[in-house]
Amino acid sequence: MKLAQFIKKFKELKAKGFVPSKRKGPTGVGHSLEAYLGLKENNIALPDLKGVEVKAHRLDSSNMITLFTFNRKVWQMKPLDAVKKYGSRDKNGGNSINSN
């Protein structure tokens, strides 16, 4: 899928508002997002779309989303380098990548 097609499908899905999950349990939201966007579920540590892994989680969830994989074969840059380049200071004075 090309990026322009992904953006179009994502906007169409967003315009629908709430859509039911296609699977119960903790993997339901991610699976449903991929299904509604027409992405094939692969369960492998490779990006879904042009070097990008699509991530989703429930609105009321307090769980963190993992941005890094331990599969070194898929790294575009080392996680520590990404934190140094894109991170910001956290409340403890260290660098982190965090979105609230």
Image (tube, rainbow, N blue to C red):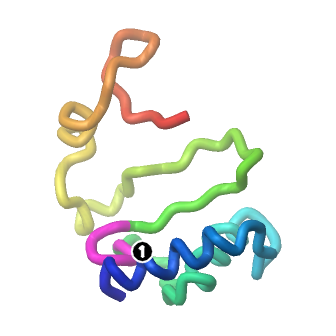
In this rendered view, identify the residue nearer to me: 100 or 40.
Answer: 100
Judge from the rendering whether residue 64 lies leftward or rightward of residue 45; answer left or right.
right
Q: Position of residue 15 (x, y in %)?
A: 64, 71
Q: Is residue 51 magenta?
A: yes
**Residue at screen point 61% across, 76% down:** 13
In this rendered view, identify the residue nearer to me: 81 or 55.
Answer: 55
- The region drawn magenta spans 47-52
Q: Residues within 10 Å of mark 1 (few under 14, many from 20)?
A: few
**Residue at screen point 36% across, 29% down:** 96
Q: Which residue is mark 1?
A: 7
Whether 88 is drawn above or below 23: the answer is above
Q: Position of residue 51 (x, y in %)?
A: 27, 71
Prevailing SS of the magenta stretch: loop
In this rendered view, identify the residue nearer to me: 3 or 54.
Answer: 3
Task: Determine the secondary structure under disc 1.
Answer: helix
Judge from the rendering whether residue 58 lies leftward or rightward of residue 48; answer left or right.
right
Judge from the rendering whether residue 47 lies leftward or rightward of residue 65; answer left or right.
left
Q: Position of residue 64 (x, y in %)?
A: 58, 42
Quadrant that contains the C terminus: top right
In this rendered view, identify the residue nearer to me: 4 or 76.
Answer: 4
Q: Is residue 49 magenta?
A: yes
Occupied quadrant, residue 44 = bottom left
Number of marks: 1
Amino acid type, residue under disc 1 in the picture? Ile
Occupied quadrant, residue 2 = bottom left
- Residue lying furthest front in this view? 15
Occupied quadrant, residue 92 = top left
**Residue at screen point 39% across, 71% down:** 45
Judge from the rendering whether residue 20 lies leftward or rightward of residue 55; answer left or right.
right
Whether 35 is drawn above or below 96: the answer is below
Q: Position of residue 47 (x, y in %)?
A: 35, 72
